[in-house]
Image (cartoon, rainbow, N blue to C red):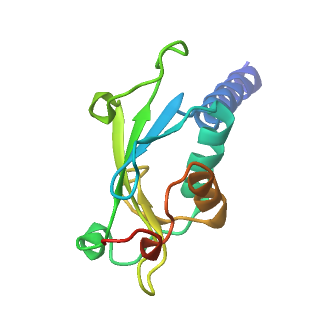
Amino acid sequence: MRRLVVCSALMVAFALASSAVAAAPRYIVVSGPCLREPALLMDWSENHAFLLALLEAPPASGGTRALGQRPRYGLALFWGAPAKRPPTRPADANQRGWFYPAHRRRLAVADVLFDGVPRHAPTRALAILARHGVPTRSAQCRGD
C-alpha cells in the first residue's frame, strides 16, 4: 500500500511539473520606443520558447536597481486570452515585465518576474524579439 501511495505521489508531481513547463501565454505584446506600433507575438510555441529561454538564463547581476536608467520595452503577457481576439492594449495584460536591450557594454536583460530576479536575455530569446522588429541593442534605436 505504501508503495502505491509513493508511486501515486510521484505521478502527480511529474504531471504538475510537466504542465508548469508547458505553460506559456497565448500572446505577448512588446511596446516602447522605436516601435511604430506594439509587436504582437501570437504563436504559442514561440512564446513558450521565449519564456523557456529566459527561465533557463542566468540571473543578471545587480538586480532591478542596476537597470534603472537603461532603455526598456514593456512586455505584456496575456495568459488564457481567447484565440479569436488578439489584444490591443498592453495595460489589459495578466502579467507585465520589461525587456532591456543590450546597452553599451551591458547584455540584454529581461525582467518577467519568474522568481523576482531579472535574467540575461539569451540568444534564443533575442532572435524571437528581433523577428518581430524589436531592437535588441539600444544602438539600433535612435534617440535613446
Is residue 109 positioned above or below 85 on the image?
Answer: below
Q: Is residue 114 left or right of residue 129?
A: left
Q: Count every numbered label the image shows and give the total.
A: 0
Of the 4 image quadrants, the one containing the C terminus is bottom left
**Where's residue 81, x and y in %?**
46, 19
User: Where is residue 2, by image quadrant?
Assistant: top right
Q: Which quadrant of the figure contains the N terminus? A: top right
Tell me the residue at 68%/22% (across/down): 5
Residue with the most extreme bottom position: 105
x, y percentage for residue 130? 59, 57
Q: Is residue 106 left or right of residue 125?
A: left
Q: Position of residue 91 (x, y in %)?
A: 27, 33
Question: Which residue is drawn at the image coordinates 37% and 27% (left, top)?
Answer: 88
Q: Nearer the viewer, residue 7 or 14?
A: 14
The residue shown at (74%, 27%) is: 7
As drawn, 31 above or below 42: below
Percent coordinates x, y for residue 131 in the rendering: 63, 52
For image coordinates 60% across by 58% down, the residue present is 56
Q: Compared with residue 75, is residue 91 higher up or lower down, i.e. above or below?
A: above
